[in-house]
Amino acid sequence: MLRFLAGRFAVLIPTFLGVALVAFAFIRLLPGDPVMLMSGERVMSDERHAEIMKSLGYDKPLSIQFVDYLGDIVTGDLGNSVVTKRPILDDFFKLFPATLELSICAIFLAVFLGIPAGVLAAVRRGSWIDQSLMGTALVGYSMPIFWWGLLLIILFSGILQWTPVSGRISLMYYFPAHTGFMLIDSLLSGQPGAFKSALSHLILPTIVLCTIPLAVIARQTRSAMLEVLGEDYVRTARSKGLSPRRVIGVHALRNALIPVVTTIGLQVGVLLAGAILTETIFSWPGIGKWMVDAVFKRDYPVVQGGLLLIAGIIMIVNLAVDLLYGLINPRIRH
Amino acid sequence: MALLEIKNLTVSFDTVTGPFAAVDGVDLTVDGREILSIVGESGSGKSVSMLAVMGLLPPSATVTADVMRFDGNDMLSMTAKQKRTIIGRDIAMIFQEPMSSLNPCFTVGFQIGEMLRRHTDLDRKARRTRAIELLDAVGIPSPQQRLSAFPHQLSGGMSQRVMIAMATSCRPKLLIADEPTTALDVTIQAQILDLLRDLCADRDMALVLITHDMGVVAQMAHRVQVQYAGQRVEEQAVRELFSDPHHPYTSALLSALPERATGRGHLPSIAGMVPGQHGRPTGCLFEPRCQFATDICRRGAERQDAALGHALCNHPLVNGVATRMEVGA
């Protein structure tokens, strides 16, 4: 087990280097630089521009900049934002709970709707239930997130006025952030209506963010179940006189979950990428929106640092999924 | 009274090209403590008829029968839920592929315990004790440790022993064994067959042994039912069947046994194949492969009485000679 973990961690190092390089290179491929965008409409002399660039270290050759950057990473310093001057790690950990809260809600919704939907579709294979579930899943999977989000806003916030348009909570409420999770903090604050407000702000972004993972999980569960339902051990389970519910829910599902868990792990990456769009649409103050803003301002260190941190999270989640895989699949454990 | 009595069982499958009768009007009886062997080539409907009794066929199968009684209960009028209280407890089944018949995600102890929990009132501790006894009874060494083993840690023979322990855990009156040794090597095969025979004797259990191996039949069965293309073509006590087969198909099967091949040349075989869904003969289904066939056989086959082994044949053999040839002449 220790060997396995050590091996997995060893693979993380080159992956991190690759992510750092890509993050470093891509943001510099964009036209413009942070100083030019900060000066905006004001005319800035070339000398002044060069001076500021030099003070930020952006006059050096790219290779030197990259090596310097790697050196900083190794010492745990992701640098400060060029725009706000605040340390990147501080901003990240302040904004990350918002993204985490949204992502957790979305993945839970996707898992708790997707797995039963997939099981139902597999058990009723070929029926109208199967066809409508899988048809819906295909539509959900193909839906452009930004367009889907806007449609929901127009309907539920605009026409029906059931949910707020943006943000995490109504401006009426103010309370200290103990955990960073608005649902928990609003409950802790004891202010009447605060939890309801936080919840109503969360609904639409959660639906939008969970759409693709939900579709993928439902489809994967269906195909895994169909495969497993034809296995000999399912017939054995039925020959024991067990109820169909137990045969499907215990004997078949337990085996079908093995590939589904892998899929769920992969969806975390999709979720964080989707969070960038979702947070932008709903003005959700999380790391997705933070990153998009940074790209528009050519805030090099924020984009680099943010990408590195997100990549790190995805890698850790994948590692966790691999460990979980061993837990649910005895053939790997032993 | 017979333990299991089936009359005119037909199982047909919906296929893309229309319905296909895998089992076609089969009668079958099993008495208590009897070992009945069902023999036939692949595709003769041996397994399907027993899966129909167990209710394990896929939804694409349609099962009809005039009579299906088990231990005095009419299984045709039972709901699926009522049937599930009998399945596993009074009739249990083991299968051809022991390795894939156990669920890879659960321990041996869990899978046996689950059967006991479904059909008995034993508490957790009693179930564990019982599971250890059962594993011990089927000859698994250090049964206590085996409880926490996963199926992939067991060999094929061990897996089949676990399957037998599980199937017999609620002391069934009837065990159906669907080619239980086909996937195992020969030494293990003999051990498993001995075990099955001992269990039947010790526990007053009847056994339906589905096989295509006449050697296994000779070793195990009290009575034999021969099936061909979904039909019962002959049924006799084992000794009589081997000494005087009445249906040409049975006779051909027996002469294809390596032990019986007298000539120095090659082993006799039956030319042709079991008819499938298409190109089914209109008369006797064995007619295209039968050396005794006459014109009358192309119109149908007559069922003989018990003295001639219920043979479904116009010209049943007596001591290897086709009788009543004048009917077809």
Image: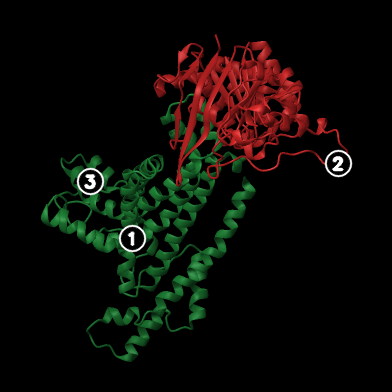
Chain colours: A green, B red
**Marker disc for residue B265:** 2
Could you classify mark 1 by the number of other residues whose Cα lies within 10 Å: few (under 14), some (14-19), or many (20 or more)?
few
Residue A173 appears left or right of A85: left
Residue B211 drawn above or below residue B14: above
**What percent of the width, then of the height, locates residue A157?**
15, 55
Tell whether label 2 touches label 3 (CB within 8 Å).
Answer: no
Query: What distance separates the C-alpha of mark 3 from that of mark 2?
Result: 85 Å
Give me the residue at 31% from left, 58% from top.
A286
- Secondary structure at badge 2 equals loop
Q: From this viewpoint, is residue A205 visible? A: yes
Q: Residue at x 51, y 79 (%)?
A: A64
SS class, disc 1: helix
Instruction: Look at label 2 and name its amino acid.
Output: Gly
Q: What chain does badge 3 belong to?
A: A
* A159 w.r.t. B202: above or below: below
Looking at the rendered structure, the kind of residue marked 3 is Leu
Query: Which residue is under mark 1?
Result: A142
Q: Which residue is mark 3?
A: A199
